[in-house]
Amino acid sequence: MESRRLLAFAPIGGPLIAQNNGVTSVESLAMNALGKQVVAWVSAGDVYVRSYGPNGNAITPAIQVTTDNASRQADVAIDSTGAFVVVWQSGPVGTTKVFVQRFDNVGAAASAVTQVNTSAVGAAITPRVAMASDRTFVVVWQSDSSGGDRIYMQNFAADVTPVGTETLASDDNTARFPDVQMNGSGSYVVAWNSTTSTLAQRYSGPGDVQGGLITVSAEPASQPAVGVAGDGSFVIAYSVDEPIVVGLRDIEARRYNSGGTALGAAFVASSDSAGNEQLPQIAISDDGKFAIGWVEASITPGGFDQIGVRPYLADGQPFSTDTTIANVGFDADPRFGIAWPDELNLRVAYEGGNDTRIQEFEAQLTLVLDDTAHTVNLFGTPTNVRVTDNGVTQNYPTNTFASISVTGGLEADFIRAKGVLTNITIIGGGGNDTLIGSNGDDSIDGGLGNDAINGGAGNDYAHGGDDTDSMYGGAGDDTLTGGPGRNLIYGEDGNDL
């Protein structure tokens, strides 16, 4: 096995269960930079929402927003305090209308239910909403009121008073699947599909068009998703036909600067050439890091649909290959929500086992060593962790991960961390290893072999494993377990066990 280094997401604990009393359809997840989050779902034709704090503690119970048994396609947006707005469509097929309601940061209704679209004919469907930090927001939707399908939008003040009038965003009669995303200052991007292309338009404020219409993709595509960073740069993802296997689909994406200039060609986010990826979503942080998620529909009758995700740095470099987050049912057409604010942890909301679930994922720098002997030094600075493995050095920005995991192979490895404040897990594997922690709260497992373990500063957990081990706790409250074999254990400062 070759050594591997990658930045990836690891689940933290089990999922939160927002609702577990019936068949649900997860519609949307929104999160602000402080980690407050709100999830929206539909159950038995009605829209529900629930708000959570940064640590997963519920701020509200499940709130029933509608009672007409005819509501669907809900979307939600959140501001910096945790106040949020919900949009949805409701009504008989062919005459569906779009509605909105605002809630404060403790889940109390802060407005009446308000109809968004003003046309008296046709159907308004697939609404999407985006909000600025001052609680102003914009709603987009698809409508056939003018003959053919077009995309409309309506801006609102923080008190849900309309700003201006209903505005036509698209200029043809084949526009479908709108999406919108707004940054904290109120700049936003609207994207949609036409028969032959994926298009987008930038706005600097309520109805203030910036630049011309952007052709994101000049091939048939569907279901675009938009993410807008704090500086106005943005990413658009969409589903296209897979070029190798007829009938399957890939997720492509393209990055743009704040002026609407493409930053390179389109790229494929999903890597499974035999997959059927659809329904993309984008979560983006204010500093430009982003994650693209999608549903991989089962191509086997009775098989599980899955949610996949791939995270990227602000410069477009991927953390890792795409990762399956969850199985979400049999031959379903599931929706899901994804959020990744300025903090390091990604959240994904999905339907699983008739539950509405939210799972948190931590960005992790992972090093897995092969079965030859390695000398690995991790040196921390305020901005980077420098990893040197047998003389080969690579730097990783500290703002791209929350923890480090190092796993040794069968030979004797020397693994040392110095000046690293991030929590580290070190597993020696086989061989006579020397494992030295750093300043964070470290977990060190010697594994097989005669190991020397030094926890360093911080509250550490050390397990010697088999054979003869020497363990030194260092400062902090440490737990040191010798395991089989002759062990020398020294706790030093702190309350040690």
Image (tube, rainbow, N blue to C red):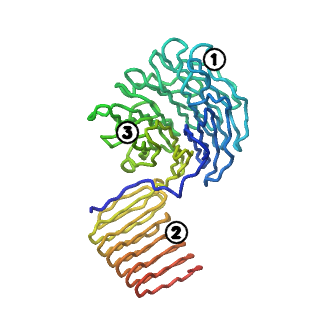
What is the residue that sits farthest to the front in this orientation?
302
Q: Mark number for residue 118?
A: 1
Residue tagged 3: 301
Name the residue: 39% across, 43% down. 303
Of the two numbered discs 1 and 2 in the rendering, the one whose residue sits closer to the viewer: 1
Q: Mark 2 to mark 3: distance in Å?
A: 47 Å
Say what amino acid the circle numbered 2 marks. Asp
Q: Give residue 111's position: percent from left, percent from top.
A: 73, 32
Q: Mark 1 to mark 3: distance in Å?
A: 43 Å
Quarter in which the C terminus is drawn: bottom right
Q: Give residue 197's position: percent from left, percent from top.
A: 38, 24
Say what amino acid the circle numbered 3 marks. Pro
Residue 339 seen: no
Q: Mark 1 to mark 2: distance in Å?
A: 57 Å
In this rendering, the answer to whether 460 lies above or below 7 is below
Q: Where is residue 131, by image quadrant?
A: top right
Disc on the earlier residue, 2 or 3: 3
Callout 3: 10 Å neighbours few (<14), some, many (20+)?
A: few
Disc on the earlier residue, 1 or 2: 1
SS under mark 1: loop
What is the residue that sits farthest to the top in this orientation?
147
SS under mark 2: loop
Name the residue: 40% across, 54% down. 7
Callout 1: 10 Å neighbours few (<14), some, many (20+)?
A: few
Of the two numbered discs 1 and 3 in the rendering, the one whose residue sits closer to the viewer: 3
Name the residue: 33% across, 79% down. 432
In this rendering, the answer to whether 343 lies above or below 108 is below
Depth check, front residue: 48 or 301:
301
Residue tagged 2: 441
* Side of 271 relative to 153 (left or right): left
